[in-house]
Image (cartoon, grey):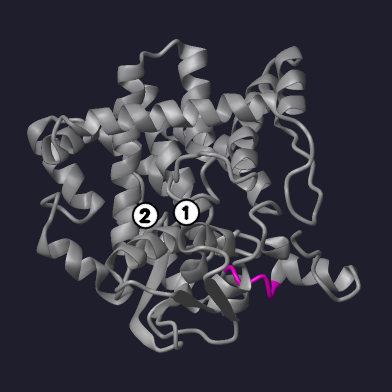
Amino acid sequence: MGPRSAAEAFSRDAAPAETYRVTLYGSLAATGRGHMTDKAILDVLGEDRTEIIWKPQVVLPEHPNGMTLEALSSQGESLRTQTVFSIGGGAVSEDPRNVGEANRAVPVYPFTSMEEVLTTADREGAQLWEYVDRYEGREIRGHLAQVWQVMQEALRRGLETEGPLPGGLRLPRKAAAYYARARSARGYLNVTGQLFAFALAVSEENAACSRIVTAPTCGSAGVLPAVLYYLKKQNRLSDERILNALATAGLIGNIVKRNASISGAEVGCQGEVGTACAMAAGAAAQLLGGTPHQIEYAAEMGMEHHLGLTCDPVAGLVQIPCIERNAIASVRALDCASYVLLSDGRHRITFDEVVQTMAQTGRDMNERYRETSQGGLSFFHGRCHGGGLVPRE
């Protein structure tokens, strides 16, 4: 999504160009074919007019997901050059090191941490979602309604679709079968089976390049809709309450994005699935009647228990282990919410502290385990299959 939007912006702003050249660096190049980055760029700039250069061994200092776009004349001379970075969730920045500074220049919210949010909520007796309405404006409701609609459409579509996912792994879709088995089960298996099926449905739709919502990223898109859909169905919740929960989840995700990162290439999968689990756990706690402090506790647990999670997609595809991780994280999110609702909301490690820990853990993590497909599961899978990864078709 990031490279596509970068290509769209560049083509609008560039002088009339005969051809284009796009160079992908670091993780963006290492997993670009598996993530269909090349297809996204060529769809915008034109397959017959665009050359893509892959440089996985070259990592730009600003961010692992770098790309340089060039507009060329008929003589091959550069008319315009721009280097940008895909920083997660479809966002693009020319200088990701100063994203926080840029956000502070035109702040949407007067607070930057969960501690500040809770302090204000205690003073005013307000719910967390009310701050989203206050500072984003009530028009945010229309956007959230569209988000919820797309989430449900992806989930239902995923439950009805079977067959192999695109790519050389030939991974079969599982959501439909899981849902059928879950509906005939009872007790805990019925609950977990439905959550698994819902998360699998959305994640498989993402792997098939269908329409989904980044929540907060494509690779972690199945967690939040699975939890919200299950709770709405189980507890017969109104759409208004779901939109409130989405607002709270977005607030949680934005705090992570501002103070750490949601980019797997930068901090590993803890920044993607970990953040998704925190968002879903907080939203679930709210829907189940939790206080703002219990919501914060649930979000903290969702992130804490994903600390250190690597990002090692096999063959560069968002399939193994990504799809299963979404399913497991959806159950973990609901478990976190259930755990804190049995408590008074008091705990030792705060959400802000665990976010800072996640950021530091990501910086300390060996780059082979940060969405490069060069270490972990991807490496061992490749070695066990003749020393090479299964290529994408």
Where residue 46 sits in the image (x, y, percent)?
Answer: 51, 63
Q: Main secondary structure of the magenta part?
A: loop
Q: Which residue is mark 1?
A: 304
Q: Is residue 261 visible?
A: no
Residue at the spot 38% in from the left edge and 74% down from the top edge: 17
Q: Work out whether residue 314 or residue 25 is closer to the camera in this orientation and state it.
A: 25
- Mark 1 is on which residue type? Glu
Residue at the spot 59% in from the left edge and 67% down from the top edge: 32
Circle number at residue 217: none
Where residue 247 sits in the image (x, y, percent)?
Answer: 29, 35
Q: CA distance from mark 1 to mark 2?
A: 9 Å
- Mark 2 is on which residue type? Ile
Where residue 200 sits in the image (x, y, percent)?
Answer: 65, 36
Q: Which residue is mark 2?
A: 349
Residue at the spot 47% in from the left edge and 70% down from the top edge: 266
Q: Are marks 1 and 2 in contact (CB under 8 Å)?
A: yes
Q: Is residue 188 left or right of residue 233?
A: right
Q: In the rendered structure, which segment of residues is drawn in magenta?
A: 371-375
